[in-house]
Each structure stands twice: as C-alpha cells, then as structure tokens.
Image (cartoon, rainbow, N blue to C red):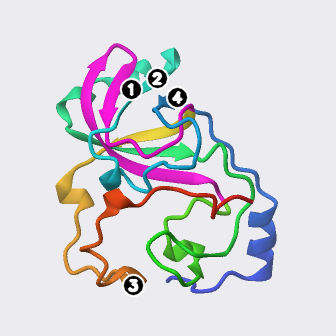
Amino acid sequence: MLIDTVNNNERSIAMHRTISYIPIGTIRTPFKSIAGMPIQPSGAEGIGGTIGIFPEFMDGLKDIEGFSHLILTYHFHQVKGYKLEVIPFMDDSPHGIFATRAPLRPNAIGISIVRLISVNDSMLHISDVDMLDATPLLDIKPYYPAFDNKNDVKCGWLEGKQDIDITKFRSDDRFKT
C-alpha cells in the first residue's frame, strides 16, 4: 500500500538526515563560465570534452566502450542556493523548479546524455557537453533505448516548443543567486 502523504515525523527525520556523495571523476569542458554555455546537450552538438575517472573507480569502466551514449549525473558546483520558481530559458513565465531543468535546485544535481567518442584508460572522450569545466562527476549510466525512451509522453508547458532551435539558446545570468 502506498502512502500519498508524508507525516510530520517522517518529514522531520528526512530533513535532518545528511546524504553525501563522493565524485568519481571530473568533467572537463571548454566552458569556463556559465554565461554563454549551451542549455542542454542537444544544443551542444559536436562540442567535445573529457571525463577523468579517479583511479579507484577505473574498474567500473569495464565494457563501457561498447555504448554510444552515456547518462552523466553531476554536481552543479558553481550553483549557490535554490529557487522554487524560475523563468526557464524557453519561456517567459515562471514555473516550479521541478517542472524545469534549471540549475537552481534544492539539490544541485544535473544530468546530461552525452556521446561517448572513445575511452583511453581512465579518460573518456565525450561530445555534446553542456556543463561547466571542472564539474564533479557523481555517476555514469549507459544509455539504453529500451530503458530510456518513452512513448505517449506529455510535455507540460513545453508542449508545442519542439520546433524551437535549441542551438540558439545560451545560458545567461538568470540563475545567479
């Protein structure tokens, strides 16, 4: 049986629990500042970067070279604070942070799907990067269409914006805290 509300005791316990992660590597990209960065990987087509995996995690790369795309989970290391409502790049109205991909999140975690170009020991060469240089990498998962593609999806406030040229959008200072 699913419980659809969180009682005050559960909320109190959750609010006082610390969750910590350790980076498994560092993402290197040409983007030294947030201004002017692509806002999504589809707007960063062909822009290359690398991932240096820390030595203690290298064994986890076994068989990764057989995948064309990877899902990266990373820490927005230059984001400070959060906002629960933001005006995203592809709209001029405020939306709840969880209905956007904006970086000012209660937990500064980002995800991107990138193309894997090659693997050289602990170095992954990738393309379609939309993250800031020196971004701490938290996890890598292989992209697998049978798991990661969905049919019959609804796109909320983004409905009807599929024809917008994402390559024209670049980051600005709207998400500074």
First reached walking from the N terminus: tag 1 or tag 3: 1
Q: First in sequence: mark 2 or mark 4?
A: 4
Q: Nearer the viewer, mark 1 or mark 3?
A: 3
Q: Circle 3 is placed at which residue position?
A: 156
- Amino acid type at image mark 4: Thr
Q: Quadrant of the C terminus?
A: bottom right
What residue do we see at 20% from left, 36% from top? 67
Residue with the mark numbered 1? 60
Q: Label 1: few (<14), some or many (≥20) within 10 Å?
A: few
Q: Position of residue 104 (x, y in %)?
A: 64, 62
Q: Residue at x 18, y 55 (%)?
A: 145
| Of the pair 139 and 30, the residue shown nearer to us | 30
Is label 2 in a helix, a strand or a loop? Answer: strand
| N-term-proximal mark, 4 vs 1 | 4
Q: Which residues are magenta?
A: 107-134
Q: Nearer the viewer, mark 2 or mark 1?
A: 2
Q: CA distance from mark 3 to mark 2?
A: 37 Å
Report whether 102 appears left or right of 177: left
Residue 21 found in image quarter: top right
**Could you tell me residue 38's position as x and y percent?**
43, 51
Instruction: Give me the C-alpha separation between circle 2 and circle 4.
Output: 7 Å
Is disc 2 in contact with disc 1, using a CB cutoff of under 8 Å? yes
| Residue picked out by circle 4 | 26
Three-letter amino acid code of the residue under disc 3: Gly
3 or 4: tag closer to the N-terminus:
4
Residue 53 badge: 2
For the residues marked 1 and 3, what is the alpha-carbon distance in whole angstroms?
37 Å
